[in-house]
Structures are given as structure tokens and as C-alpha cells.
Amino acid sequence: MSLIKTHKLAKLCLKSNPILFTSIRNHWNKDYKPMAYPQTEKERKAAAAKYGLLPEEYKPLPDDGTGLGDYPDLPFVSAESKDAYYPYDFPELKRNFNEPIHAEADMIGEDRYDVSARLRVPMSTQWFQFLGVMFGTFAIYYWLEDCKMFIGQLPKQYPLDDKPSYTFEIEK
């Protein structure tokens, strides 16, 4: 198949199926590449529109040299703490179409860390359990150090005089 026919076929598919065109067009990486930190109000409005946010709710991440530029400072909400019964566009990711992704999305996915979860056992109890096991093991070791557990052996028997200490010699 020639390149021209392939190009025409791709154009026909994209014209006949606008959903396919939209899904391809809205997932280009260049669209989500952070630009320079917005300095003017016009740049802030353009960045808010780029990420699909209202200008009053758009707040860029701090310009601390990490290279995140105009990326929005989104709330730190993990997928685990989102409503499971909400009709998401992508229910397996608990995301809607064109929703901006958090800068720490790799950490707060549903199979990762849940920022809103409370611990089953409080941290103080976990520390007491850990230190109790460690100090208990050390105490048992310290108290039982004198009770060696090995097979006893007699000290080596060395001869006291110049006679041979073996008895297998044949006498003449």
C-alpha cells in the first residue's frame, strides 16, 4: 500500500469518526508539556484554559526550579479516596475526560498510596510493638548469654613427661 493511499485512508477514518479524531488529538504529549511559569494575567488565563480549569481556580505550582512551569497545583486526592459510584469516563482510573493529571499521579493511583486512609493501628502503638520486640529479643539474648547451647568437650590431654602418649607402638 502506498504512502498516499495510507494517508487518504487515515484522513477518511478521522473525518468519518470524530470521536476517534478527538481521542487521538486530545492525548498528545505536547499539549500537556508545561510551559514557562505564568508572569502576567494573560499567561495565567491561557494556562488555565490549556489545562481545562477556570481562571479563578487555576493556581500554578511554585516556581522552585523543578521544571513544572505552569502546571496547576491540584488537590492531593488519591484515586482510592474518590467516590467509587461516580460515573467516571474512565472508571478503572477514576478520571474524567480532559481532567488534568496531578503532578504526583504515579504515587496516588488506586494501586498505590492512599492519602486519606487512616491507619488500622496508630503509629504510637506500632512503635511500641517494634521497640518491644527489639528490646525483648535483646533482653533474652543478654540474660541467656551465659547458657551456651553446644556439646561440651573435655580439654585437650597433653602428656606430662617425655613418654609417648600413644599406645599403638609394638614393644620389642
Image: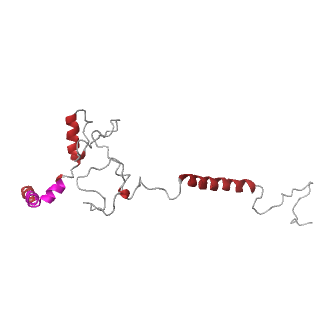
Residue 96 placement, left or right of 2: right
Q: Quadrant of the N terminus?
A: bottom left
What's the coloring here? Answer: secondary structure
State the residue lying farthest toward the front: 56
Q: Residue at x 17, y 52 (%)?
A: 25
Measured from the top left, where is residue 107 in percent x and y?
38, 51
Q: Residue at x 19, y 52 (%)?
A: 26
Residue 134 covered by magenta stretch: no
Location of residue 5 (image quadrant): bottom left
Q: Quadrant of the C terminus?
A: bottom right
Measured from the top left, where is residue 4 in percent x and y?
6, 55
Q: Which residues are magenta?
A: 10-24
Measured from the top left, where is residue 43 in percent x and y?
21, 36
Q: Residue at x 40, y 56 (%)?
A: 112
Location of residue 36 (image quadrant): top left
Per the picture, the main secondary structure of the magenta-coloured stretch is: helix
Measured from the top left, where is residue 92 in percent x and y?
30, 62
Q: Residue at x 14, y 56 (%)?
A: 21
Residue 11 covered by magenta stretch: yes
The correct choice, above or below, for 18 with respect to 51 in the image is below
Between 41 and 161, the one nearer to me in the picture: 41
